[in-house]
Image (cartoon, rainbow, N blue to C red):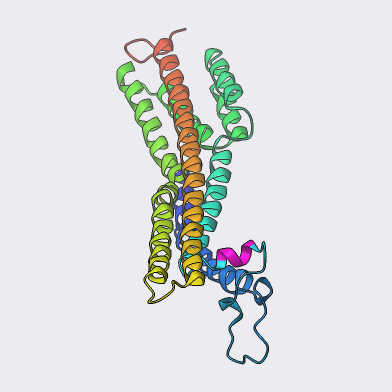
Amino acid sequence: MESTAVKLDNKRSLQSWFSPLVILLTIAIGFFIYTFILGDCSHFQACPEGVTDCVCTDNHPMPGDYFAIVYKGGVIIPFAIGLFLMMIVFSIERFITISKATGKSSIDVFVKKIQLHLNNNQIEEAIALCDQQRGSIANVTKAALEKYHEMSGEKSLDREQKVVAIQKEIEEATTLELPMLERNLVIIATIVSIGTLIGLIGTVLGMIKAFSALATAGSPDAVALANGISEALVNTALGITTSTIATIAYNYFTSSIDALTYRIDESGFSIVQTFASRHNTSGEAIK
């Protein structure tokens, strides 16, 4: 188990920089997309002839050009794009990690094979199967089987003490594996709330511009009014979209982790029950 703990510590040290780096990069990419892609002059109408101080992004968007429409969403858009990219990156990372945690073959087949080996008292074969399977379930099962093998030859403990030792080994191995499965889920859960709030901030700023245009002395500024409403709606749409996808991803990953945890408990319970049934109260194997 020491080698397993060392490997997990190395993984944690390597991933300690992953989350902040992704956050910074996605926000930077959001500003890049906003400035150089959405804000490219090709998406806006040309400046009037003879005007030297014209900024192309101040002009009307080209008809049907959604890039320009999104750009008109205002200064909140880069952060909203960054959140969306952040959610995509962390979702892909969690999907890969959880997929690896299930192992190389079907979990149902793996658990059934482990139970078959246990019923035939083939502990070494079961351990070898864990090495082939890999993943979180296999790691916990292997730790339990190694303790099972150790307790089978232990003469100084009775059955109850040996069972407790196996159960403790399963709990410790599970404790080492679960943090790796749950890493970065808190970021996705945070994006669920922040995505909506970012969209709401952009919506409020857009509506402020819209009502400011209505309050203009004389005739209302129709262009400013349209820009304000557009900014409000674009931010709302982007924020809600990000939060919706993040909610679906978070629920999917938590359900997958719950299923893995159930399988770990099932495998551990099977090992403990098999050991208890094959040893008498003094801890000696029943022949």
Q: Is residue 69 magenta?
A: yes
Figure quadrant of residue 286: top left
Instruction: Name the dominant secondary structure of the magenta segment.
Output: helix
Q: Depth check: 59 or 147 in front?
A: 59
Res. 124 in view: yes
What residue is at 61 percent from the left and 92 percent from the top? 52
Res. 22 in view: no
What residue is at 41 percent from the left and 44 percent from the top? 179
Residue 157 at x, y = what percent? 31, 21
Q: Depth check: 75 or 278 in front?
A: 75
What residue is at 60 percent from the left and 33 percent from the top? 133
Q: Is residue 191 above or below residue 169?
A: below
Location of the N terminus by quadrant is: top left
Residue 271 at x, y = what percent? 45, 20
Residue 149 at x, y = what percent? 46, 25
What residue is at 45 percent from the left and 26 percent from the top? 262
Q: Relative to 130, is 211 on the left or the right?
A: left
Q: Is residue 196 above or below residue 155?
A: below
Q: Which residues are magenta?
A: 66-70
Residue 181 at x, y = what percent? 47, 42
